[in-house]
Amino acid sequence: MRLTRTAVSAALLAVPAIAAAAENDDLRALREEVARMREGYEKRIDALEKRLAQAETQAGKAEAKAAEASVQAREAAAARPPATANSFNPEIALILNGTYTKQSQDPASYNETPNPRSYHIHGFVPSLGETAPPRKGFGLGESELTLSANVDPHWRAQLTAALAPEGGAEVEEAFIQSLGFDNGFTLKAGRFLSGVGYLNPRHAHTWDFADAPLAYKAFFANQLRSDGVQLKWVAPTDLFVELGGEAASGGAFPSTDKNRSGTTLGTLFARVGGDIGISQNWRAGLSALATDPRDRTWNDVDSTDTTVENRFSGKSRMSIADFVWKWAPAGNAKERSLTVQGEVFRRHETGSMTYDAAAASVGTQTGDYASNQSGGYAQTVYQFQPRWRVGYRYDRLDSGTTRLGLVDSGALTAADFPLLSAHRPTRHTVMMDYATSEFARFRVQFARDKSRFDFGQGRALPDNQLWLQYVVSLGAHGAHKY
């Protein structure tokens, strides 16, 4: 028993010693861990301080180099001559249009009035200085030089000069156009191709055929240009909706009186369009034109085979309906595509006509004049494989009914106005073209034109026309309109 008490007492006395020893071991371990951590952090801090010192050194060198480059740039700028006007060139685009033509009728007599057989589109008053068909053989078509650029964030300007086949140049377009107007509005001012119809706003090199339809030749002398202002608005809707109008000074056929103050020609147009799935899209439009020509002059041959100059003054009103539908499989027009388009024109004119106005020595005769004329065309172009296209166009005009007060009164006879006798010109045209790239296209076209008239036989005078054409584009050229 005594031995047991002695063992227990010894054990109890050893517990504090063992606990103290264990505590000393834990403290030692903690101190060692803290020391290791301190050593690790000190090494990391030293490494970071070295990297910071290196970065500061490199930044100092870069700053010194930048300062040196800045000094060199200022010295180079001081050494350069001052900027001149041509240091900021606009975008330049050049369209070259070459043709070879062969016709069964002589194009040189197209506008020769002494011979009624030579009249242009019979039944329709010609424009003064109307463009005749191209002469036989090789020639330069209507080529164009365009300069355009943004003036500032608000305006863009463009100048297009047409290089005439006969030589020389004329201003086809010269206008400023707004950029970034709110609510879908666009303003254009200057000389521009009128927005009426489908084909009129497009430059000739973008047409699918080498020349204009008969309706454009008869009613617009190929294309209607205006000197004035144009305002358009595109609605913020999924369906394409565009409304527009123009106020311009006359001068271009069918208007006249370019020197009159104010506006003498006004137009309105509206268009809608959209998609049908992913492979089809369409657009339809209506346009109206109003002008009041004064002394619009043309030559005719009276019943005595004498060349006379007649003049019309009054009101001219025209309406145009146009439609285009396009198809491409899955929307990929580069492989295959089909385009169908057409336009219908109707013109109504009323006023007075002066017969042989140039014969002032014997006096002039004036009477009422009224006419209702119409025309149009329909065409289709099919791209059957990449770069290759074929097309067909049908043109038709109707001279309608023309009322001449001088004939109704018995003062003159209808034979004194042969150009205004009834006629329904037609033309069939086929073409094939190949585009070596988006910048070059080569075309062959054949047309059978029955717009002239044979007075001797009382029938249309057919004209078989062959065209070979190339159209190439150089320089900056924007995307074509729909």
Image: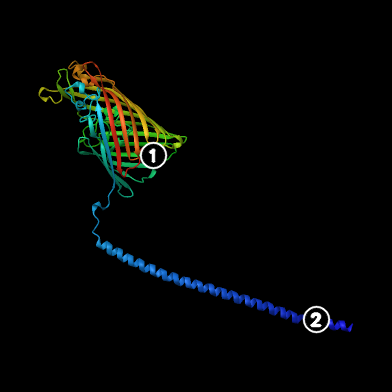
Picture residue at 72% right of the left edge, 80% below the top: 21
Q: For the N terminus, which image quadrant?
A: bottom right
Residue 454, given in percent of the width and then of the height, sits at 23, 19
Answer with left or right where residue 186 lies relative to residue 416.
right
| Residue lying furthest right | 1
Q: Residues within 10 Å of mark 1 (few under 14, many from 20)?
A: some
Local SS, label 1: strand
Q: Which residue is mark 2?
A: 12
Q: For the C terminus, which image quadrant?
A: top left
**Quadrant in the picture for residue 284:** top left
Answer with left or right where residue 240 lies relative to residue 36.
left
| Residue lying furthest left | 361
Distance, label 2 to label 1, CA atoms, is: 102 Å
Residue type, numbered disc 2: Leu
Q: Which mark is residue 234?
A: 1
Q: Nearer the viewer, residue 294 or 387?
A: 387
**Quadrant in the picture for residue 463:** top left
Picture residue at 63% right of the left edge, 77% below the top: 32
Q: Which mark is residue 18?
A: none
- Answer whether residue 202 is visible to the viewer in this image: no
Q: Nearer the viewer, residue 43 or 398?
A: 43
Residue 103, given in percent of the width and then of the height, sits at 24, 26
